[in-house]
Amino acid sequence: MKRVVVAAAVIERDGRILLTRRLATGHLPGMWEFPGGKLEPGEAPTDTVIRECREECGIDIEPVEILEVTHHVYPEKEVLLLFYACRLVRGEVQHIEVADHAWCRVDELGRYDLPPADVPVLEKLRARGGAFSRGGSTG
């Protein structure tokens, strides 16, 4: 079975968390998720979330801290996910490699169809009240 390591950004802006919707093609089509992607060889996970947010959404972010680590086995692959609490530095979300996006309060996140590997992050965010970046955002 194929094993992949994914780094995802849990981006807070003005008390809301960014979710992006996967394109209709590929793995888990149409599901909502925290933006991110697979690590490239030799790439640090924090560099991955920065790169993926630029490539997928056209935004610049700053990782603040590791928020959660999850592991999930899908029928076609095994995934280790590293979730980073991030701050939006600049830019507005564009739909470059995502179908849609939403800025949600923590209590709204459960309404979205998230991949099973992302669900544990909801409990972490609820326990923290959603706040993790210091000083707000500049975006």
Image (tube, helix red, strand yellow):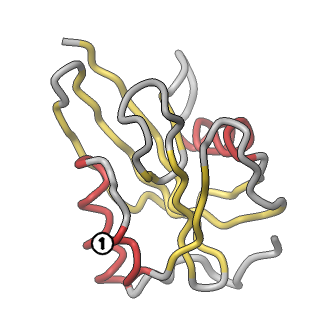
Which residue is at 49% across, 82% downward?
105
Q: Residue furthest top?
A: 1
Residue 54 location, quadrant: top right
Split into 4 quadrants, where in the image is the N terminus? top left
On the image, the x and y values in percent for residue 120 come to: 24, 61
Q: Is residue 57 above or below residue 48?
A: below
Q: Nearest the camera: 93 or 37?
A: 93
Q: Nearest the camera: 37 or 50?
A: 37
Residue at the spot of label 1: 124
Q: On the rendered structure, is 21 left or right of 73?
A: right
For mark 1, does the 10 Å Cα neighbourhood hold few (<14), some (14 to 19), or many (20 or more) residues? few
Q: Is residue 53 above or below residue 24?
A: below
On the image, the x and y values in percent for residue 101 come to: 60, 58
Q: Mark 1 falls on what kind of element?
A: helix
Residue 124 location, quadrant: bottom left
Q: Is residue 2 above or below residue 6?
A: above
Split into 4 quadrants, where in the image is the C terminus? bottom right
Residue 122 location, quadrant: bottom left
Q: Amino acid at mark 1?
A: Lys
Which residue is at 70% across, 56% downward?
61
On the image, the x and y values in percent for residue 30 come to: 44, 43
